[in-house]
Amino acid sequence: MKGIIFTEFNQLVEETWGLETWEKLLDEVNPPSGGAYTSADTYPDAELFSLVGALSKTVNTPVPDLVRAFGAYLTPRLVRLYPVFVKNKTAKQFLQSVHDIIHVEVKKLYPDAVLPMFRYEDPAPDRLVMLYRSDRKLCPLAEGLIEGTAKQFGVPIRLAHPRCLHKGDDHCRLELQIGKAHGS
């Protein structure tokens, strides 16, 4: 997993629960990297999963809830780093660009990045279906990124998740109902 995920997770933990909590996690997990992350390097997925698991126990919050919160936290931070991806787009257009535009650009920067696969169904102007596949099964992260997108664009997005990798399905089906922008 790319280091930017680790550095941003570190920031989330420190901003939400404090530096002491981050240091406690590093002591408990004792990651091979020593917890010294750089955004461009690659680290084992298991290292992040161990940190999230330890945080779950420390703050008494289920792992999926933490991963979803991380996705919501990550969205505006990535938008600040890469504003070109949201410029002149609606929330729906932005979400539809994840696989064929954003992930293509990520692969140019980080050829070794292992990214999830998204496919889309576009049943109506105010609806979008995102079909998610990933061996990592980080659908709560995708949910959080969608939540963060709603906030970033100032639009309500209702999310249903009727099919899920965690339930034995071969993909996750994320059904979105996208409302009007606030103030429209």
Image (cartoon, helix red, strand yellow):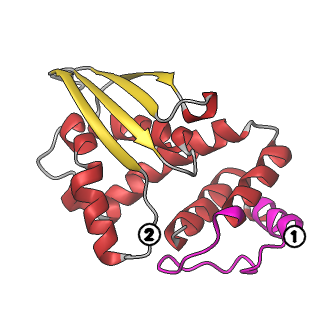
Q: Which residue is rendered at x = 70% and y = 56% of the image?
A: 49
Vertical placement of 18 versus 163: above or below?
Answer: below
Judged left or right of residue 22, residue 93 is left
Q: What residue sits right under mark 2 in the picture? A: 113
Q: Which residue is rendered at x = 66% and y = 50% of the image?
A: 16
Q: Which residue is rendered at x = 67% and y = 81% of the image?
A: 36
| Disc number for residue 56 | none
Vertical placement of 69 versus 104: above or below?
Answer: above
Disc 2 versus disc 1: nearer the observer: 2
Disc 2, SS: loop
Q: Which x, y percent locates residue 102?
A: 27, 58
Q: Residue furthest left?
A: 88
Residue 66 magenta:
no
Amino acid under disc 1: Asp
Vertical placement of 22 versus 109: above or below?
Answer: above
Give, as a single range, the part of the protein colored magenta.
Answer: 21-46
Dot 2: few (<14), some (14–19), or many (≥20) neighbours within 10 Å? Answer: some
Q: Quadrant of the N terminus?
A: bottom right
Residue situated in front as seen by the camera: 126 or 107: 107
Q: Which residue is rendered at x = 65% and y = 36% of the image?
A: 65
In the rendered image, which quarter is residue 3 located in?
bottom right
C-alpha distance separating marks 2 and 1: 27 Å
Judged left or right of residue 150, residue 162 is right
Judged left or right of residue 13, residue 111 is left
Q: Quadrant of the C terminus?
A: top left
Amino acid under disc 2: Ala
| Disc number for residue 27 | 1
Disc 1, SS: helix
Residue 45 magenta:
yes
Earlier residue among tags 2 and 1: 1
Residue situated in front as seen by the camera: 94 or 104: 104
In the rendered image, which quarter is residue 92 located in?
top left
